[in-house]
Amino acid sequence: MPLTEPQAVKIQLNACGQRVDKGQRLRLALSTAYWPVIWPANEKATLTIEPGSARLDLPVRPGRDSDNELAPFPSPEGASPATIRQHARGFYDRRRHVDLGTGVEINSRRSSIGTETHVHTGLEIKRFSNERFEIHPDDPNSAIGTCHWCQSYSRDDWMAETRTDVSVYALRDCWRIEARLVARDADGVVAERKWTEDVPRDLV
């Protein structure tokens, strides 16, 4: 049943701080989804802000006399990057398009690190991913996400590789997950698993 009365919403913020000076403004963006990062609810929803009565309360840290004595944060520290020998270049490709016949929106992403060797260990590594997310803007239960990942590690006559395929379907009452995992070594397949799981869409 749609909610027509104003609702108070409490959201946990990340551990961060921001100084807002006089005259500056904060922008609040509300959305029912953030496709394809956050998938929509199983029904179309509309958010309404009541002008004049809506209010955003943020935690405020009062100023202290000691604030002016605080030293600035030092530069970040980190280890030197490992020495890598690149044999084949990687790539990154991200696209979004709309099927003008069906209206389905498709987000796709393909990436690879190519082929590289970590000099300090002699380990040769390959990684590849292909991800596709599609949805019809008028049907939140048409969302489908399909991902394929492949990772390979080798050194001398040793090799290990995993291939993973996962598809998620947004059904009205559940998320249907179909997955397949294959692990190989130099002699062939050592493990394989295929499974399906339904996760209830409990929005209460």
Image (cartoon, rainbow, N blue to C red):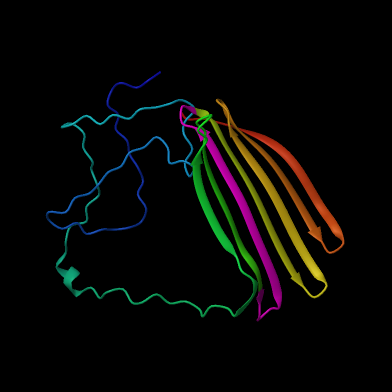
Q: Residue at x 16, y 54 (%)?
A: 24
Q: Quadrant of the N terminus?
A: top left
Q: Residue at x 15, y 58 (%)?
A: 21
Residue 161 percent location from the top left of the image: 75, 60
Specify the segment rendered in magenta: 117-139
Q: Is residue 126 magenta?
A: yes
The residue closer to the viewer here, 200 or 49, is 49
Quarter location, residue 15: bottom left
In the image, residue 139 sits, relative to residue 55, either above or below, namely: above
Outermost residue on the front side: it is 101
Q: Is residue 144 left or right of residue 154?
A: left
Outermost residue on the left side: it is 22
Residue 136 percent location from the top left of the image: 50, 31
In the image, residue 105 sits, relative to residue 4, either above or below, namely: below
The residue closer to the viewer here, 51 or 131, is 131
Q: Residue at x 72, y 53 (%)?
A: 163
Quarter location, residue 44: top left
